Amino acid sequence: MTEERITRVETPDGNTHTTTEVIRDTELQRSSGKGMMLLVLVVIIALVGGFVLMQGQDAEIAKDNAIANAADSVGNAADSIGNAADKAADKIAN
C-alpha cells in the first residue's frame, strides 16, 4: 500500500513550505540465491553428463579395438592353418 503525506509549514513571515513524502509498505525484494543455486546445479549436471558420455565413448573404442584384435588373430590363425595344409599337401605329393 502506498501512502502520500503532505506537510505544510507556515513561517511567522507568512511563507509556506510544502513537503511531500511517499511511503510504501512493500518490502525490498531480495534475492534468495535460488537462481544461483539452480545455475550451479545445472552446470554440475552438465559436467557429470559429459564425463559419463566420454567414459562411454572410451569403452566403445576399447571394445571395438578388442574385436579388431580378435579378428586379426583369427585371420593369422587361418593363414597358419592354410600354410600347414599347403606343406602337408606338398609332402604328400612328393
Image (tube, helix red, strand yellow):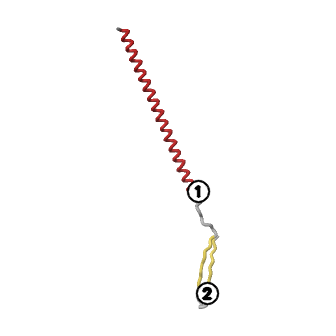
Name the residue located 58 percent from the left edge and 61 percent from the top edge: 31
In the rendering, at what x and y percent does residue 74 appear?
44, 24
At a point 62% along the width and 81% down the height, the residue shown is 7
Contact (CB < 8 A) between labels 2 and 1? no
Identify the mark nearer the N-term, 2 or 1.
Answer: 2
93 relative to 56, above or below:
above
For the residues labelled 2 and 1, the Cα–Cα distance comes to 52 Å
For label 2, the SS is strand
Q: Amino acid at mark 2?
A: Glu
Give the residue pinned by disc 2: 10
Q: Is residue 11 above or below residue 84?
A: below
Q: Quadrant of the N terminus?
A: bottom right
Q: Give the residue at x 63% y 67%.
A: 26
Q: Residue furthest left?
A: 94
Q: Secondary structure at mark 1?
A: helix
Identified by mark 1, the residue type is Lys
Residue marked by disc 1: 34
